[in-house]
């Protein structure tokens, strides 16, 4: 069996007293997009930068392209694409010249026009860097990371601060990378981004992975219980279906059999001529599950 592109076991990182990453396991297979999803301060950037070789771990095992990321040699580094801010590049070079310059650093660069096409900058190939919009500069950042034709790309929060159409464009770029057979390690705050792009997602909260799996089933999403809420004036004889009072007179119950439970509730109410007031029936959204997993406030309110 092929060695995974990234393998991490019990990874830890402390900054003084702050335990930013508290023992996580991650495996990324070749050719997949893997998303590390979590709120601010969860430990995403710390994890990525350890894997990129920019930060030293405090504990645990890590392997990237079968090497220890703390001791990457030059040939291995050339197989990894890292997206940095292009603010450091010569503002008077054109897009094409910039990418060409970076290609010069690598043993097997990707053809310059192909790189420009993948990031959607074809119309700007002869434009100087200082004439690009913010979003176009971010695309150039990705293009620079692609110049050496890396096998593995790290994208750390690639769409934070983007407007909705720029996000869609960035997603298309990632899709293009998948089509090229690249392995992508992505971090994001956004559940929809992880769902759209990633084959597998790990949710990180306070330095620990709290759920992992395909976006459609993560956190028990596929078997999530339906939530039913209602109020009754007089609940005498109300069948016991596991409902709990929420404090404001509302009763809430969670069930895997909503049809049956609703039938019993409505039959009871009709029998008595009672009303199930303010009735709500809903399944937790992906957002609810994410918030629940990361310790936020979940629910319909
Ligand atoms: P965000 O989504 O806000 O970028 P993140 O998930 O990338 O967050 P990290 O940047 O990895 O989170 O930070 C994790 C924790 O480690 C935070 O509590 C942060 O304050 C702390 N931390 C990060 N870098 C350092 C540092 N260089 N020195 C001290 N503490 C740090």
Image (cartoon, rainbow, N blue to C red):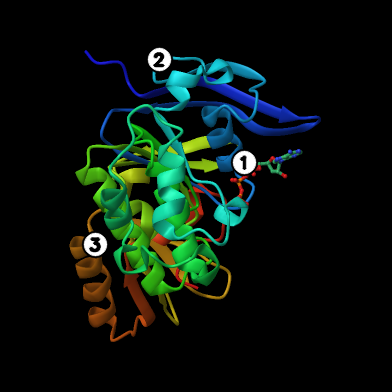
Give whichever of 168, 199 is nearer the camera.
Answer: 168
Do the numbered discs 2 and 1 sit on residues whose CB atoms are within 8 Å?
A: no
**Residue at 22% across, 42% down:** 180
Examine the rendered structure and indicate whether residue 253 appears above or below residue 58. Answer: below
State ligand 1's quadrant.
Answer: top right
Q: Describe residue 87's horizontal placement relative to residue 184 as left or right.
A: right
Give whichever of 242, 11 is nearer the camera.
Answer: 11
The quadrant where residue 281 appears:
bottom left
> x, y (%) of residue 296?
57, 56
Kindly identify which residue carries mark 1. 206
Q: Is mark 1 within 8 Å of ligand 1?
A: no
**Residue at 33% across, 56% down:** 119
- Residue 285 in sight in this render: no
Kindly identify which residue carries mark 3. 258
Q: Residues within 10 Å of mark 1 (few under 14, many from 20)?
A: some
Q: Residue furthest right?
A: 16
The quadrant where residue 81 appears:
top left
Q: Earlier in the sequence, mark 3 or mark 1?
A: 1
Secondary element type, mark 2: loop
**Which quadrant does the N terminus fall into?**
top left
3 or 1: mark nearer the eye: 1
Do the numbered discs 3 and 1 sit on residues whose CB atoms are within 8 Å?
A: no
Give whichever of 143, 20 is nearer the camera.
Answer: 143
Secondary element type, mark 1: loop
> x, y (%) of residue 9?
49, 19
3 or 2: mark nearer the eye: 2
Q: Which mark is residue 66?
A: 2
**Residue at 37% across, 73% down:** 165
Examine the rendered structure and indicate whether residue 287 appears above or below residue 218. Answer: below
Q: Which mark is residue 13?
A: none
Q: Earlier in the sequence, mark 3 or mark 2?
A: 2
């Amino acid at each position: 069996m092929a060695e995974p592109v990234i393998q991490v076991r019990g990874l830890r990182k402390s900054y003084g007293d702050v335990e930013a990453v508290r023992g996580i396991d991650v495996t990324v297979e070749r050719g997949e997009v893997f998303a590390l999803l979590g709120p601010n301060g969860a430990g995403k950037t710390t994890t990525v930068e350890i894997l990129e070789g920019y930060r030293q771990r405090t504990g645990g095992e890590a392997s990237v392209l079968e090497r220890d990321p703390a001791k990457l040699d030059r040939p291995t580094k050339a197989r990894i694409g890292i997206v940095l801010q292009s603010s450091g590049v010569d503002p008077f070079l054109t897009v094409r010249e910039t990418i060409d310059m970076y290609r010069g650093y690598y043993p097997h660069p990707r053809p310059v026009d192909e790189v420009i096409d993948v990031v959607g900058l074809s119309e700007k190939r002869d434009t100087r860097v200082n004439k690009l919009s913010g979003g176009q500069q971010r695309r150039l950042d990705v293009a620079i990371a692609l110049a050496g034709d890396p096998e593995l790309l790290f994208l750390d929060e690639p769409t934070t601060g983007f407007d909705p159409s720029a996000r869609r464009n960035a997603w298309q770029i990632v899709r293009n990378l998948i089509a090229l057979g690249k392995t992508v390690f992505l971090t994001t705050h956004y559940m929809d981004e992880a769902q759209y792009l990633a084959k597998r997602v790990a949710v990180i909260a306070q330095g620990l992975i709290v759920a992992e799996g395909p976006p459609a089933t993560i956190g028990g999403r596929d078997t999530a219980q339906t939530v039913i809420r209602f109020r009754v004036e007089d609940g005498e004889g109300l069948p016991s279906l596991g409902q709990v009072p929420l404090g404001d007179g509302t009763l809430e119950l969670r069930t895997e059999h909503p049809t049956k439970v609703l039938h019993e509730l409505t039959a009871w109410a009709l029998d008595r001529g009672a009303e199930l007031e303010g009735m709500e029936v809903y399944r937790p959204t992906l957002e609810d599950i994410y918030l629940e997993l990361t310790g936020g406030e979940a629910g319909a309110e």
